[in-house]
Amino acid sequence: MNDQDPTTSWQRYHENLLDCGQPAFTLDISRMRFSDDFFETTLPLQERALADMAYLEEGGIANPDEQRQVGHYWLRDADRAPTPELRDQIRRDIAEVKAFANGIHNGEITAPNGEKFERVLLIGIGGSALGPQFVAEALGNPAGKMGIHFFDNTDPDGMDQVLAALESQLATTLAVVISKSGGTAETRNGMLEAEAAYKKAGLDFAGHAVAVTGPGSKLDKHADGQGWLGRFPMSDWVGGRTSIMSVVGLVPAALQGVDITAFLAGAAAMDAHTRGGEARSNAAMLLALMWYSAGGGKGAKDMVVLPYKDRLVLFSKYLQQLVMESLGKEKDLDGNTVNQGIAVYGNKGSTDQHAYVQQLRDGVNNFFAVFIEVRKAREGASLDVENGATSGDFLQGFLRGTREALSGNGRESMTISIPEVDAYNLGALIGLFERAVSFYASFVNINAYHQPGVEAGKKAAGSFLEVLANVRKHLKANPGEALDAETIARDLTTDPETVFHCLTHLAANESAVSTSGDGKPAARTFTWVS
């Protein structure tokens, strides 16, 4: 195709624009370079993906490695849950979230000092924080209800920064601790840091705390035993990266005043739109097929997400987890080594045009772009900033200009357009990508709902912490003696590089440990001096 021929470009746009009607969004694939027979040759993949989705939604074991159902699609349409018990649980959870948020907003549920809660401190990691962060950035505090802050890492300096911002407001800050197992190290550490901060301020943490966790988990038992304000149950059939419409996402969203009914309805509408039909009328199927086409079914090209809206700045980060954790797999369902995945990155337009769009247009052609257009520029009238043009006009111009610049140099792109960033449309947008991930996983025959690589990293971290404890103990047992990594590693029968990293960490963070020697690792010595 010749993207620079206006006639050809217009014809391709006319033929390759999907206007979904309800939800009110469009998907333009006219700048993707799929073959003329692509839809016909991939028909068996499409049929299998629809069958796999039906099996999943009917309650089949869609996560065979962990022998679990996958039910995040039921969360926005409880009628589709496979049993009456699950339907009742979903409806009950939503009702309890709404009642709790209303009680907080109305002052029926107060802080221990009798004052209304004014803000939220969310403590979580991965999907237990990233989804709520994305929603907060996109829809943040629409009804003037509660601002939100996050502990989303085990970085003490980061937590100190958050606590400094909350220092004078801690007495009216509600802490929401989110962990399915209750044993996630980062979340546990954040909870302990928060408990210590509240205690230091003379406050009862239990009277400020809510748990979102699995029934019977360590966190559930801790919250129950300490008499926390509330507990909301997480289900084992909802994974972290798809938990944004479970209590994980709904509790913080409702507390901020987000219309969670509309949020769920938008996703439900997208689910209904993408349950069947031929590929060109099914937006999620079409999106997944374009991923498959661009990367040859092997993830050979990265996906660059370019939302032209400040509110969607975290969308690419959110999609990094949703797409990369779901699709980045070594083995397929038959045990074959396939090393699948699609790398995702992005920021926002038009900021990206002053950053890495230069490489996108002129550098290595190893990507396809996904533009996100929000048609409504702002609430109310806009200022003319130049010759009758508004800031929103410029934003649209930069979007269209970048799309043309990429296409003119043979770079592929898609454009998704939504009317505005509100709860309904955000729900639909999330639903679109969730279902595209499910379809693509079926195309390439992988389990999208487990994360063995993440578990491997956690195991390795545990091993490092064990060595760190032994190194600290060894130094302490030999006070005043200058020891090097190789000597300690030999004594502990472990890896000298790991020992060296332990030693440099201790020297940087514990006053009892000093170091000397030049920059070469083998020449450095470490001493316990007190």
Image (spheres, grey):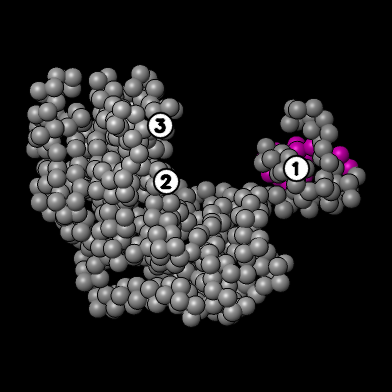
State the residue at coordinates (66%, 60%): 167
Mark 3 or mark 1, whichever is nearer to me: 3
Cα separation, mark 2 vs mark 1, equals 33 Å
Instruction: Please provide percent x and percent y for residue 471.
Output: 75, 48
Give SS at disc 3: helix
Q: Nearer the viewer, residue 352 or 60?
A: 352
Mark 2 sits on what residue? Answer: 314
Give the mark count. Answer: 3
Q: Which residues are magenta?
A: 481-496
The amino acid marked with disc number 1 is: Ala
The amino acid marked with disc number 2 is: Leu
Instruction: Please provide percent x and percent y for residue 382.
Output: 33, 42
Q: Is residue 433 above or below residue 526?
A: below
Mark 3 sits on what residue? Answer: 352
Instruction: Please provide percent x and percent y for residue 395.
Output: 33, 34
Q: Is residue 422 above or below residue 39?
A: below
Residue 135 visible in image: yes
Question: For residue 487, what is the image quadrant?
Answer: top right
Residue 484 located within the stretch drawn in magenta: yes
Q: Nearer the viewer, residue 309 or 157?
A: 309
Mark 1 sits on what residue? Answer: 508
Q: Is residue 244 left or right of residue 149?
A: left
Q: Earlier in the sequence, mark 2 or mark 1?
A: 2
Give SS at disc 2: loop
**Label 2 Cα neighbours within 10 Å, binned few <14 / some 14-19 / many ≥20:** many
Cα separation, mark 3 vs mark 1, equals 37 Å
Q: Earlier in the sequence, mark 2 or mark 3?
A: 2
